[in-house]
Image: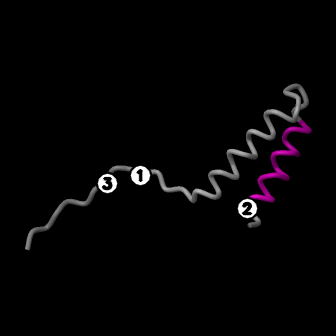
């Protein structure tokens, strides 16, 4: 029996649904919230992310 070396190369591990949700959240925040309104943008991001992770 031959012992093979472990493949230690990093591999991206993602949950496709979560990745799609995060992409949609970032797209929504970028397009809807004005860039100069930082406080509002942070609130929107926090709310949307909390909604994504509750699923």
User: Dominant secondary structure of the magenta stretch?
Assistant: helix
Check the image and report above or below for 15 versus 23.
below
Instruction: Verify whether residue 50 appears in magenta.
Output: yes
Residue 43 x, y percent position in the rendering:
88, 45
Left or right placement of residue 30 versus residue 43 in this view: left
Mark 2, residue position: 53
Measured in 3D between alpha carbons, the distance from the residue under mark 1 to the one under mark 2, in whole angstroms, is 23 Å
Please name the residue shown 80% across and 59% down the image: 51
Using a 10 Å C-alpha cutoff, classify the residue at mark 2 as few (fewer than 14 neighbours), some (14 to 19) or many (20 or more).
Answer: few
Q: Which callout, 1 or 3, points to the residue nearer the camera?
A: 1
Residue position marked by numbered label 3 in the rendering: 8
Q: Which residues are magenta?
A: 39-53
Q: Position of residue 26 (x, y in %)?
A: 74, 41
Q: Secondary structure at mark 3?
A: loop
Q: Nearer the viewer, residue 2 or 18?
A: 18
Residue bearing the label numbered 1:
11
Kindly state the secondary structure of the residue where label 2 is placed.
helix
Q: Residue at x 87, y 34 (%)?
A: 33
Q: Is residue 29 magenta?
A: no
Residue depicted at 84% across the width and 41% down the height: 42
């Amino acid at each position: 029996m031959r012992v093979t070396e472990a493949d230690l190369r990093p591999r991206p591990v993602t949950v496709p649904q979560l990745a799609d949700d995060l992409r949609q959240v970032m797209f929504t925040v970028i397009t809807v919230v004005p860039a100069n309104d930082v406080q509002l943008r942070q609130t929107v991001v926090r709310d949307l992310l909390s909604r994504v992770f509750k699923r």
